[in-house]
Amino acid sequence: MSQHVAALLIIDMQNGLVNGEKTPWAKESLLSNINKLIAKARESQQPIIFVQHTGPDGTILAQGSEMWQIAPELQREEHDSYLTKTRPSCFYQTSLLSLLAEKGINKLIVSGMQSDYCVDTTCRAGRDLGLDTVLVSDAHSTFDNGVLSAEQIVAHHNKLLSGPFVTVLTSDEVSFKN
């Protein structure tokens, strides 16, 4: 059995956010870079964890709806881990921390949607929980918000979180080996 070094966390890459009414910034490279990370994690036999945001019944991300499903463009497998959440933090009232502890993982490679909500909150919480947290600079995205463009928001979070909360690496720089 291989030793686990890091887990790849893929946040909210669901149809409602990736393939919904609005298109996330740099959608094609976002999907490509996350799939590159998935391939690297599989090659190194490291865990891959998909997290799905679940909204109330009747909302676009209601559990079980077509928009709630993980985007089909991602290379998923049955043995990957799947968690649901109802808040921006992937740790709040989920089994993520216990799953990481069970696998002996203290390093989290973070990717997904949305840079300014769930990605940001999870990065900050991960560091507060003592995890070595890596934000993949070219594997998270969001939408324009009326004040800043999505591209500016992504760049802002890469800069803001770097150092105190995360190590920022590109998808090419990420390694799942010791």
Image: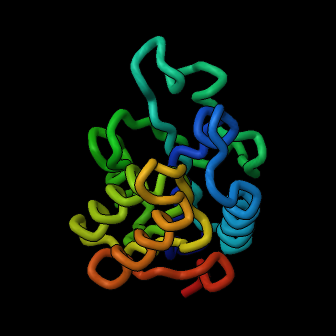
* Residue 6 left/right relative to 76: left
Q: Residue at x 28, y 70 (%)?
A: 127
Residue found at the very far top of the displayed protein: 58
Using the image, determine if residue 122 lies above or below residue 134.
above
Q: Quadrant of residue 30?
A: bottom right
103 vs 39, nearest the viewer = 39
Using the image, determine if residue 66 lies above or below residue 125.
above
**Which quarter of the rendered picture does the N terminus lie within?**
bottom right
**Which quarter of the rendered picture does the C terminus lie within?**
bottom right
Q: Residue at x 73, y 61 (%)?
A: 35
Percent x, y for residue 17? Answer: 59, 39
Q: Look at the image and tell me whether residue 99 can be seen.
A: no
78 vs 108, nearest the viewer = 108
Q: Look at the image and tell me whether residue 153 can be seen.
A: yes
Percent x, y for residue 45? Answer: 65, 68
Using the image, determine if residue 62 lies above or below residue 160.
above
Percent x, y for residue 166? Answer: 37, 77
Q: Residue at x 68, y 82 (%)?
A: 172
Percent x, y for residue 36? Answer: 73, 68
